[in-house]
Amino acid sequence: MSYRITYQVNVDWVGDGMGPMSGNTAASVGMAAAGGAQRKTFFNATPVGQVTKTFLTADVTTLTNAMAADIAAQMNVAANLAQIQAFSTGGG
């Protein structure tokens, strides 16, 4: 048997006036896009997520590093970057 982590990252465009802001902390918008916010969602690229036979400290580090690398690779695709950047102008 193995341990598995699966994950999802949401990138929301929360425009001015769509929610209270205090300092550098945005109000929580929960798992649903707030108001008229636009969203791009990224999931684990492999259907099974990241897998390990043990769940020790080193395994957690390996799993989360793999997760971060997977999400970064997806976000850094030119088409994804362009789509997210277009949210601020009403595109996307």
Image (cartoon, helix red, strand yellow):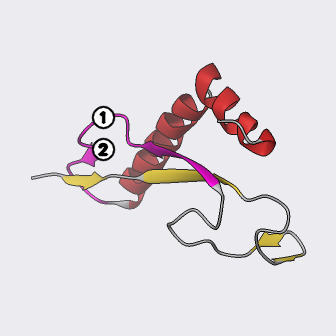
Q: Secondary structure at mark 2?
A: loop
Locate residue 21 relative to residue 90 in the image: left or right.
Answer: right
Q: Position of residue 77 (x, y in %)?
A: 59, 23
The residue under the point 25% across, 38% down is 47
Locate residue 51 relative to residue 19 in the image: left or right.
Answer: left
Q: Which residue is mark 1?
A: 46
Locate residue 88 relative to residue 92 in the image: left or right.
Answer: right
Amino acid type at circle 1 is: Thr
Q: Position of residue 23 (x, y in %)?
A: 90, 74
Q: Position of residue 67 (x, y in %)?
A: 45, 44
Magenta-span inclusion, residue 25: no
The residue under the point 60% across, 22% down is 79
Q: Seen from this angle, which residue lies furthest right?
A: 23
- Look at the image and give the residue range highlighted in magenta: 38-55
Compare residues 38 and 64 and report the one nearer the observer.
Answer: 38
Q: State whether residue 10 is above or below residue 34.
A: above
Q: Position of residue 16 (x, y in %)?
A: 85, 62
Amino acid type at circle 2 is: Gly
Magenta-span inclusion, residue 41: yes
The residue under the point 52% across, 31% down is 74
Compare residues 24 and 79 and report the one nearer the observer.
Answer: 79
